[in-house]
Image (tube, rainbow, N blue to C red):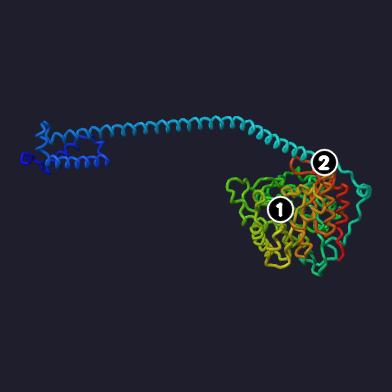
Amino acid sequence: MLLDFEEPEKDDTDALWELVSRSQPERARTSSDTDRATTAKDNSSRCLSTEHQFGGESRASGEQSTPKEGIKNETEARRKQSARRQARQVHHAERQSEAEKEKSQEKGNSGIVKQTQQEQTSEQNKRMVQPRRSMILFVFVLGIAFLASWLVYRFQQSEAELSIPWIPSPDARLFSQRPLPPVNEKLLLSSSEYKLPLQTKGRDIVDQNGNRFKLSSVNWYGASDELFIPGGLDIQHRDMIANTIKKLGFNSVRMPYSDEMVMTNPTVLPHLLTANPDLIGKRALDIFVASVEALTDAGLAVIINNHITSAVWCCGADPCDAGWANDHLGPLCRVKQTEEQWIEHWETVMERFLENPLVIGADLRNEVRGLWGTMPWDKWATAAEKCGNKLLKLKKDWLIIVEGTESANHLRYVGKRPVVLDVPNRVVYSAHVYSWSGWGSSEGRYSKRTYASFVDAMRTNWAYLVEDDIAPVWIGEFGAPNHPGQGDANYWANLMRYLKAIDADFGYWAVNPRKPKDNEKESYSLVKDDWVTPVLDYRLKDMTELMVPRKT
């Protein structure tokens, strides 16, 4: 019976298992399925071995199935069982995946809900914050408007206070009721008290014997303006005007001219010279020279001043007149000149006075400022040296007056960068001081300043040169109206107090009762319209006291 049993070959068994493996779905071919197939193979081998031993008995017992059919049935059963298990696992995995998706969706929905809630909360906060911001902005703008209104009110109130009419002091009223004191001939440069030429020594202007000559000057303007001639020649003879200035107590006169006067040198209209018929038909420069000679014939010293480029009232915002040269401005300027032309104009004017010993100096340029006060001191000092040396080659005796920058307010850098000329002891510096000066500073204009604040500004700007005995400073322009307000009176009182304290050289603006343009009234005038009658008030009172030099 054992001979009738045929044991399957190894190759047939392997082929059977390959058939079983191919019959399973792809997704069931996992490592666990492979293990189960291996187990089934082992069991089948054991079954075949048993059949080999007991095959005769099985067939003898009358069974109809063969060993291959048994293996196939068992394998099929195991395959189905495995397939069901795999199906359950796949189903379970799908349920887990769906559960995770639902969970994720719920989480996403929860996030959306949360985000929506946050957005709603944020929107509510914005709706709450917006009115607050609007309220804050409204309060801020209201505060700014209130502050601006208050500042405007305070400014207007302050200006109104400055304009309150000033009541003259008893001394000023008493001075106005008396005649002027007689002329002190000893203060005139033409007197025997002085030996020419003049020069500088420390803070002073001195003669050849070392005697101080204090400049007590007044401005006689007009040749720098539209009419090209000094004012008043239609009212009084030039000799009479010179005598009036002398009787006022001044010992020197500043005579401004414009470059346009020199460049055009027009013939002056006759009606402007009715009181000087000998000058009718002459040109502007000839009339200017004749007026200067009238002053020196009266014993008065004269300083010539290049006041402005264009023949107009000085000094406005026109950049063409803000410096000694304007060629860099191109076609902007009606009257153009280079630095060389500026010097040539000076030579043309000063050549007329080579033989006049009482023409003592040249004030090189009025109120140099550049565009909105931007003129560097070194640039101006360099030009002043160039021009000054040219003039000293014509006559080495002249004083060279150099004004400060920023409209003659600023001489702060002279200590570090002085003007140095080829001829020593010839430089005199000049500053201008008006009530509106100091307007760009933190403490405001001089009309508002206390005396201490005013003195501090003077010392910073120019007075250190005098107080430290470095160089002379001539206050070439200052002035105040005949009927001042509180601001002008405050400025004047502080200025006179300080100029007297340091015994300063000075030049008042101006003697003229009328301005050339439209014959406008000059509120700073020291004489009435007849060019003879003095205006006796607080100004002449203080200047009469200032004219006498302090003995050292």
**In this picture, residue 173 sits left or right of residue 331:** right
> Residue sitting at 61 percent across and 31 percent down?
130
Name the amino acid, label 1: Asn
Snapshot quadrant of residue 543: bottom right
Residue 282, horizontal then vertical, whole percent? 72, 49
**In this picture, residue 39 sits left or right of residue 437:** left
Q: Nearer the viewer, residue 331 or 6?
A: 6
Residue 59, horizontal then vertical, whole percent? 9, 34
Give the secondary structure at mark 2: helix
Q: Nearer the viewer, residue 329 or 236?
A: 329
Q: Is residue 455 shown to the viewer in this render?
A: yes
Pointer 1 or 2: first along the chain = 2
- According to the picture, the residue beneath numbered tag 1 turns out to be 366
Q: Residues within 10 Å of mark 2 (few under 14, many from 20)?
A: few
> Residue sitting at 83 percent across and 67 percent down?
211
- According to the picture, the residue beneath numbered tag 2 turns out to be 161
Quadrant for the N terminus in the image: top left
Q: In the rendered structure, are the residues bearing label 1 and label 2 in contact, judged by CB atoms less than 8 Å apart?
A: no
> Residue sitting at 83 percent across and 43 percent down?
485
Q: Is residue 198 shown to the viewer in this render?
A: no
Name the amino acid, label 2: Glu
Residue 380, horizontal then vertical, whole percent? 66, 57
**In this picture, residue 98 sits left or right of residue 229:** left
